[in-house]
Amino acid sequence: MKLIVGLGNPGSKYQNNRHNVGHIFIAYLIEQLRITDYGFKIYRTDCYMNESGKFVKKIIRNSKFTIKDLIVVHDDLDIPLGKFRIDFARGPKLHNGIESIENELGTKDFWRIRIGVDNRLATGPMNGESYVLNDFRPEEKTILTTLFPEVKSHLIRLKLH
């Protein structure tokens, strides 16, 4: 069984932020899959992004999961909107949620589903921190709805390995 954790910030204020694409993807999975049929246990963080490591560590400590079972879903500014990567022990140049998890677990050795959110050229110049805390525009959400089935398909194949 694999443990999938979608990163994001809690509360309605952040619900549609680019930084919450991990939460948005988990909601999609819940809607689309009978997760138990695929051997997944899924969670959305209930804390702020910077505290994600404490959340993940608590789940692992209080369950039968190990770090090798962990798959973290998060936003990535290094990847264009509409693209994704699945990597083991590799992530974006800077991501406070991932850094928090690595620090709490004492390792980088877990899977990451890195969903691209960078489309700043279309919105004008903006620093990364401000950009990810803005909501997806309607046309960007449409891109995600076409991307998520592909991510789901790769996730199911990853579970088999």
Image (cartoon, grey):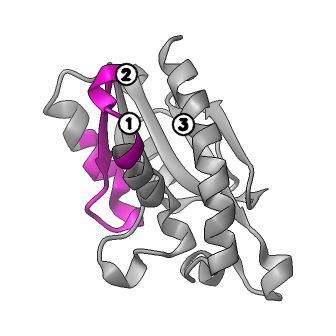
Q: Give the quarter of the image for residue 48.
A: bottom left
Question: Which amino acid is tagged 1?
Answer: Leu
Label 1 vs label 2, nearer the camera: 1
Asked which secondary structure carries label 1, the reply is loop
Which tag, 3 or 2, sits closer to the chain's start? 2
Q: Residue at x 78, y 86 (%)?
A: 123
Q: Which mark is residue 152?
A: 3
The residues colored magenta run 31-57
Residue 26 included in the magenta stretch of the image = no
**Vertical placement of residue 27 versus 134, above or below:** above
Q: Residue lying furthest left in this view?
A: 62
Residue 121 visible (yes or no): yes
- Point out residue 121 in the picture as x, y percentages from the top left corner: 86, 78
Depth order, front residue of 50/79: 79
Q: What type is the residue that disc 2 sits on?
A: Tyr
What secondary structure is marked by label 2? Answer: helix
User: What is the C-alpha distance between the residues marked 1 and 2?
Assistant: 8 Å
Residue, disc 2: 38
Badges 1 and 3: C-beta atoms under 8 Å apart? yes
Residue drawn at (61%, 84%), measured in percent from left and top?
130
Amino acid at dot 3: Lys
Give the class, few, some or many, for how many residues have Cα within 10 Å of label 2's Cα (few <14, many ≥20). some
Can you identify the residue that label 1 sits on? 33
**Who's the residue at 31% across and 56% down the image?**
45
- In the picture, measured across the screen, residue 62 lies left or right of residue 144, that is left
Quick one: SS at disc 3? helix
Residue 67 image position (x, y, % from top left):
37, 26
Pick the residue in front: 142 or 5: 142
The reply to whether discs 1 and 2 touch (Cβ–Cβ < 8 Å) is: yes
Q: Position of residue 92 (x, y in %)?
A: 67, 51
Relative to 118, 86 lies left or right: left
CA separation in Å, label 1 and label 3: 9 Å
